[in-house]
Image: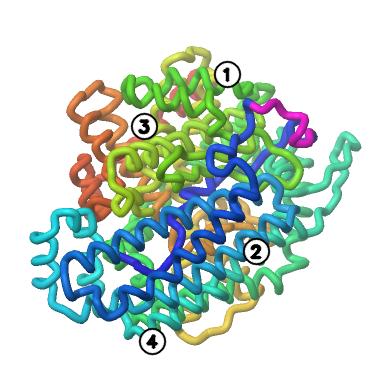
C-alpha cells in the first residue's frame, strides 16, 4: 500500500494502434455533434469549480501531519489515518482526471498542462508530508496490525494493502528517505511530460507528395492512414519521410528516454531492488521469471510469427516482404469500413455472450457521452479508457476513422471501461484499483468476441481473409510486437544498470538488433529498412515502467477465458464477471487463477499459439482454394 499521494492509474491503456485520419480529422471540435463528445461536466460543472475544489483539497491535505506519532497507538488511530488518506486520494484523483482529459482534447492548450503541473506539485508536497506513515506502521510487528484489524472490522478493507506493505517492508525506507523519494516526484515525470508535449504538439511535420500529386503533412494520424495504403510507392514515401523526420531529433528523443530509464534505475536502487524490472514487478507480487518466461516463449515461437509473415507476403504478392508492407490491405479493393454508429451496433451484438447486465452498461456508455469519438486538431492520438472516477463512470478517448481496426479499438476500450465500472461498483475505494498486470485481459477478451462474431456472419472468402488477417495482426501487434517492446525495454534498462550511458544512436542500434531478429531480416523473411531503427522514439509505453509485457500476458489469458465464455459456460461467465468485479482485492496472479487461468505456467501461451496456427491454417486453406 502506497500512502504517498499519487493518482490512481488514470490511463489504463494507450492502445497499440496509432490514431488514423479521415474527414472528421479536418473538423474543428465545435463542428462535431455533442453526442460524440465527452460530457466532462459529469466531473466538474466548470473550471472555476475545479479550481475551488483544488484549493479546498490542498488545504485538507495539510492535515495529514496530525497523525504523526500516533498511528499505531490504537486501531482507531490507524483507521482514521487510512480513511483520511483514501478520502484525499479519491478527491485528488478526480481533480487530476479532469485536468488531464481536458488537456487530451487539445494538447496545444497549455492552460490544462499548467493545471496538471499544479497538481503534481500539490501531490509531491502531500507525499513529502505523508512520508512518515509507512515507516511508522512498519515500526510495529504484523501481529499488532492484525490485532487492530480484528478489533476494528472497518480496517478489513485495508488488509490487502497492509499485508502488501509488510511483504515489501525491506524496500521501505526511513521517514527522512521516504520524504526525499516523495519530493523527487516533482522532477521524475519530466521526461514523459516533455515527450508527450513534443511528440503531440511541437514536433515539426514533414510534407510529402504522394504518387497522385496529393500533398500530405505527416503526423501520427496521417502516418497511420497512409502506411495502410494499397500503393506500395506511397507507403515507401510515407515510411521513409516519417521516420527520417524522427531521426532529425534522435539526440533529443535519446535524452528523454535515457532520463526516464535513469529515473527507473534510481528508484530501484534507492529501494534496494536487484533491478528496475524487479522494482516494477515486486509490489504486485509478480516474479521476474514471468517476464523472462514471456520473452523466452516468444523467441522460441518466432517460427510461428515468421509463418504469419510468409502468409502476408503470399497475400500481397510481393517478391520481398518489407516492414512497410505490414499494414497494407491484403485483399485488393476490399477495405472494410464502418461508421461509428454501425460500430456501436456491431459491438452490442458481439459482446452479447457477456450477459444482459454487462450489455446494459455498454449501451449506457455509448449513449450517455462516456466516449469522445473523433480525431480533432490537437487531440491526443491513440485511444484509452480512464476508469479512475470512482464515484462517477469511466471515460473513453477514441480517434475513430471508420476502419475495422477502429471497431476493434472501440470494443477493446469498452473492455477496460467495464472492468473499471464493475470494480468501482463492487469494491470499496481502497480495493477498487486493479493492477496493470490484469488491465488488458478484459479489453483483449472483447476483441476475441468481436473477431468470432464477425467471422460467424461472413461467408465471402475475401472478407473472411480480411477478418482472419486482421485477427492475425492482433497476434502480431499484441503478442509478438509488445513482447518485442518488452525485450527492448528490459535491454535498455540493463545497459544503464551496467553503467552504460545511452544516446539516440545507441537506442537505435539496440532497437534495430531486436526488430531484425523478430522479423527475420537476416533470414530473408521480412526486410527491415534502416530508418525503422527510429521507431523506439515514437513509443509512449517506454515511459510507463515495464507496462508493455502485460499486453502480451493479458492477450494469452483472454484467449483461454474467451473460449469458455463463447461456449456458453455459465460457470465460466460467472467467474469472469467476478474477476471484473474484483478490483485489487487480491494479487493479479491469484485473481486470474480464480478466473480459470494460471499465468505461472506456459499453458495460456501455448493455447494462444495453438489458436494462431488454427487461424493460419484456415487462411492457407482459403488461399489454396482461390489459387486452384
- Which residue corresponds to the image point at 39% horizontal and 23% vertical from the top-left? 359
Q: Is residue 106 magenta?
A: no
Q: Provide the residue designation for mark 2.
A: 195
Q: Which residue is mark 3?
A: 614
Magenta region, residue range: 27-34
Closest to the observer: 124 or 476? 124
Residue that badge 4 annotates: 176
Q: Label 1: state its secondary structure.
A: helix
Q: CA distance from mark 1 to mark 4?
A: 57 Å
**Where residue 458 sits in the image (x, y, percent)?**
48, 15
Q: Which residue is mark 1?
A: 342
Q: Are marks 3 and 1 in contact (CB under 8 Å)?
A: no
Residue 28 on the magenta span: yes
Q: Nearer the viewer, residue 596 or 271?
A: 271
Left or right of 493? Residue 324 is right
Separation of disc 2 and disc 3 at Cα? Answer: 40 Å
Dot 3 crowding, Cα within 10 Å, few <14, some 14–19, many 20+: few
Residue at left offset 73%, top offset 39%:
376
Q: CA distance from mark 2 to mark 1?
A: 35 Å
Mark 2 and mark 3 lie on one chain; the one further toward the N terminus is 2
Contact between labelled residues 1 and 2, with CB atoms less than 8 Å apart: no
Q: Position of residue 560 (x, y in %)?
A: 28, 37
Amino acid at each position: 500500500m502506497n500512502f504517498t499521494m499519487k493518482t490512481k492509474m488514470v490511463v489504463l491503456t494507450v492502445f497499440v494502434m496509432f490514431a488514423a485520419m479521415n474527414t472528421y480529422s479536418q473538423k474543428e471540435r465545435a463542428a462535431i455533434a455533442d453526442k460524440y463528445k465527452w460530457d466532462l461536466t459529469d466531473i466538474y460543472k466548470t473550471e472555476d469549480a475545479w479550481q475551488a475544489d483544488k484549493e479546498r483539497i490542498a488545504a485538507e491535505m495539510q492535515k495529514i501531519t496530525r497523525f504523526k506519532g500516533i498511528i499505531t497507538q490504537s486501531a482507531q488511530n490507524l483507521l482514521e489515518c487510512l480513511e483520511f488518506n483514501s478520502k484525499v486520494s479519491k478527491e485528488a484523483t478526480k481533480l487530476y482526471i479532469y485536468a488531464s482529459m481536458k488537456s487530451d482534447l487539445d494538447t496545444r492548450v497549455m492552460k490544462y498542462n499548467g493545471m496538471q503541473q499544479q497538481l503534481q506539485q500539490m501531490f509531491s508536497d502531500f507525499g513529502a508530508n505523508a512520508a512518515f506513515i509507512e515507516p511508522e506502521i512498519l515500526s510495529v510487528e504484523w501481529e499488532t496490525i492484525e490485532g487492530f484489524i480484528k478489533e476494528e472490522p472497518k480496517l478489513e478493507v485495508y488488509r490487502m494493502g497492509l499485508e502488501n506493505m509488510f511483504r515489501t517492508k525491506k524496500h521501505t525506507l526511513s521517514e527522512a528517505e521516504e520524504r526525499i523519494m516523495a519530493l523527487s516526484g516533482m522532477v521524475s515525470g519530466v521526461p514523459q511530460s516533455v515527450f508527450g508535449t513534443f511528440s503531440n504538439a511541437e514536433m515539426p511535420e514533414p510534407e510529402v507528395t504522394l504518387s497522385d500529386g496529393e500533398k500530405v503533412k505527416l503526423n501520427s494520424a496521417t502516418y497511420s492512414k497512409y502506411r495502410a495504403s494499397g500503393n506500395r510507392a506511397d507507403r515507401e514515401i510515407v515510411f521513409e519521410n516519417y521516420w527520417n523526420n524522427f531521426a532529425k531529433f534522435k539526440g533529443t528523443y535519446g535524452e528523454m528516454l535515457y532520463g526516464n530509464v535513469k529515473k527507473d534505475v534510481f528508484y530501484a536502487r534507492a529501494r534496494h531492488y536487484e533491478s528496475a524490472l524487479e522494482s516494477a514487478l515486486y509490489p504486485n507480487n509478480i516474479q521476474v521469471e514471468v517476464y523472462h518466461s514471456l520473452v523466452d516463449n516468444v523467441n522460441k515461437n518466432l517460427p510461428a510469427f515468421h509463418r504469419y509473415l510468409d502468409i502476408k507476403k503470399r497475400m500481397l504478392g510481393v517478391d520481398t516482404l518489407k516492414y512497410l508492407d505490414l499494414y497494407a490491405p491484403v485483399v485488393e479493393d476490399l477495405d472494410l469500413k464502418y461508421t461509428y454508429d454501425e460500430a456501436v451496433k456491431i459491438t452490442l451484438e458481439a459482446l452479447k455472450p457477456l450477459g444482459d447486465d454487462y450489455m446494459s452498461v455498454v449501451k449506457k456508455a455509448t449513449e450517455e457521452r462516456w466516449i469522445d469519438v473523433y480525431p480533432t486538431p490537437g487531440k491526443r492520438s491513440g485511444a484509452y479508457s480512464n476508469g479512475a472516477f470512482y464515484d462517477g463512470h469511466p471515460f473513453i478517448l477514441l480517434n475513430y476513422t471508420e476502419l475495422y481496426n477502429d471497431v476493434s479499438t472501440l470494443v477493446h476500450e469498452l473492455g477496460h471501461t467495464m472492468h473499471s465500472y464493475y470494480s468501482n461498483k463492487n469494491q470499496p475505494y481502497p480495493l477498487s484499483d486493479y493492477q496493470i498486470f490484469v488491465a488488458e485481459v478484459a479489453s483483449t477478451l472483447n476483441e476475441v468476441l468481436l473477431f468470432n462474431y464477425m467471422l460467424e456472419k461472413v461467408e465471402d472468402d475475401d472478407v473472411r481473409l480480411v477478418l482472419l488477417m486482421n485477427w492475425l495482426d492482433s497476434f502480431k501487434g499484441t503478442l509478438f510486437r509488445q513482447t518485442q517492446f518488452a525485450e527492448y525495454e528490459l535491454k535498455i534498462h540493463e545497459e544503464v544498470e551496467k553503467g552504460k550511458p545511452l544516446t539516440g544512436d545507441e537506442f537505435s542500434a539496440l532497437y534495430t538488433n531486436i526488430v531484425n531478429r523478430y522479423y527475420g531480416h537476416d533470414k530473408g523473411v521480412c526486410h527491415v529498412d534502416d530508418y525503422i531503427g527510429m521507431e523506439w522514439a515514437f513509443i509512449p509505453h517506454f515511459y510507463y515502467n515495464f507496462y508493455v509485457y502485460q499486453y502480451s500476458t493479458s492477450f494469452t489469458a483472454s484467449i483461454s477465458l474467451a473460449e469458455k465464455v463463447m461456449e456458453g459456460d455459465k460457470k465460466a461467465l460467472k467467474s469472469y464477471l467476478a474477476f471484473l468485479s474484483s478490483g485489487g482485492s487480491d494479487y493479479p496472479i491469484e485473481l486470474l487463477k480464480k478466473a480459470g487461468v494460471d499465468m505461472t505456467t506456459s499453458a495460456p501461451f501455448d493455447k494462444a499459439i495453438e489458436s494462431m496456427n488454427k487461424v493460419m491454417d484456415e487462411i492457407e486453406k482459403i488461399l489454396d482454394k482461390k489459387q486452384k
